[in-house]
Image (spheres, grey):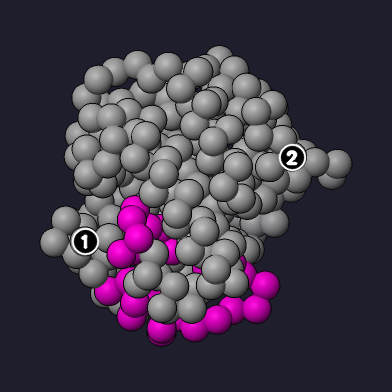
């Protein structure tokens, strides 16, 4: 294989945060360990947010403590403000994930910040991580559209990416938080952001709300995105984005990319096993296609 991407498993964070039934800490840790056994080397293990707003993440500290350090694995903690960053840093995580928002309205509801404020806060979070001796990445949420105000200007996203890149993250991620993007938009925006932030890698995060998630992954990889998110089983959503459906499933991403000659480092059979295990643990059918039909 001549090409490869870096895969980021977001199931323990984005996959679970929208689930109404609280998943126990031990099951979260088991999910993370299974993701590692299936080849994931970067994992969003929890978000350090207000437990009143996202009760599923109330045990973030306990998850990190029970998981412990894992050789060769980067454990990412998602944070929306300095308070969250302080909590995440206190756990000894490997990387902070900051979130800047392209839409003022979404920013107000998701994290109480305007778009401009979220860029400034993300820069401060990156600085806090660096001061603590670890790295940080930043995701631009609603990069392809806002659930409240509709279209997002790609020029705004590119300008944000440029400003955020100057703060020193390890990558710039583009998130289609509500699953409205189509492949042509993905190609254009990934290409433009790549140009703006090179040599920093561009990471992509897609939700399959309207059935274009997996096609968007392909468009992004073809446009040079070096890092791709997935969620085991295709779980996911956003508590502050009405109607947002699951993330693209890790096993669907692995199937498509590996068979297209793009190495992911993932073990498809183990991912499918884990998706089915998770479906059993949560008592629901997973949206993932590979979990339904299995890996041949
Ligand atoms: Zn998401």
Residue 102 placement: quadrant: top left
Q: Gap in Å between the C-alphas at discs 2 and 1?
A: 34 Å
Reading the image, the residue beneath label 1 is 50
Residue at the image point whose x is 55% and y is 15% from the top? 184
Closer-to-camera residue (270/215)? 215
Residue 280 placement: quadrant: bottom left
Per the image, label 2 sits on a secondary structure element best described as: loop
Residue 174 appears in the picture as rendered: yes
Residue 271 lies, with reference to residue 212, above or below; the image says below
Residue 190 lies, with reference to residue 15, above or below; the image says above
Is residue 28 found left or right of 257 in the rendered image? left
Q: Which residues are magenta?
A: 59-84
Residue 38 appears in the picture as rendered: no
Callout 2: 10 Å neighbours few (<14), some, many (20+)? few
Residue at the image point whose x is 54% and y is 36% from the top? 163
- Magenta segment: does it hold 260? no
Of marks 2 and 1, which one's residue comes earlier in the chain?
A: 1
């Amino acid at each position: 294989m001549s090409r490869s991407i870096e895969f980021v498993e977001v199931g323990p964070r984005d996959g679970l945060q929208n689930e109404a039934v609280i998943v126990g800490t031990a099951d979260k840790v088991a999910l993370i360990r299974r993701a590692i056994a299936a080849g994931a080397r970067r994992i969003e293990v929890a978000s350090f947010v207000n437990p009143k707003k996202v009760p599923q993440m109330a045990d973030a500290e306990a998850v990190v403590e029970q998981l412990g350090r894992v050789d060769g694995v980067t454990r990412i903690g998602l944070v929306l403000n300095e308070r969250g960053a302080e909590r995440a840093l206190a756990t000894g995580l490997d990387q902070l994930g900051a979130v800047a928002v392209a839409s003022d309205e979404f920013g107000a509801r998701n994290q109480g910040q305007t778009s401009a404020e979220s860029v400034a806060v993300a820069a401060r979070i990156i600085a806090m991580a660096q001061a603590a001796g670890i790295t940080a990445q930043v995701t631009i949420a609603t990069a392809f559209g806002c659930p409240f105000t509709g279209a997002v200007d790609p020029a705004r996203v590119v300008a944000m990416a440029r400003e955020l890149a100057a703060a020193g993250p390890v990558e710039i991620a583009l998130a289609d938080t509500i699953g409205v993007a189509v492949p042509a938009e993905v190609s254009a925006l990934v290409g433009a952001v790549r140009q703006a932030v090179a040599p920093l890698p561009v990471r992509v995060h897609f939700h399959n709300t309207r059935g274009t998630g997996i096609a968007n992954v392909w468009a992004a990889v073809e446009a040079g995105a070096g890092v791709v998110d997935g969620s085991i089983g295709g779980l996911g959503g956003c508590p502050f984005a009405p109607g947002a459906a699951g993330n693209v499933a890790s096993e669907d991403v692995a199937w498509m990319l590996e068979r297209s000659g793009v190495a992911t480092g993932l073990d498809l059979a183990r991912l499918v096993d884990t998706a089915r295990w998770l479906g059993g643990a949560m008592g629901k059918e997973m949206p993932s296609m590979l979990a339904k039909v299995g890996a041949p």
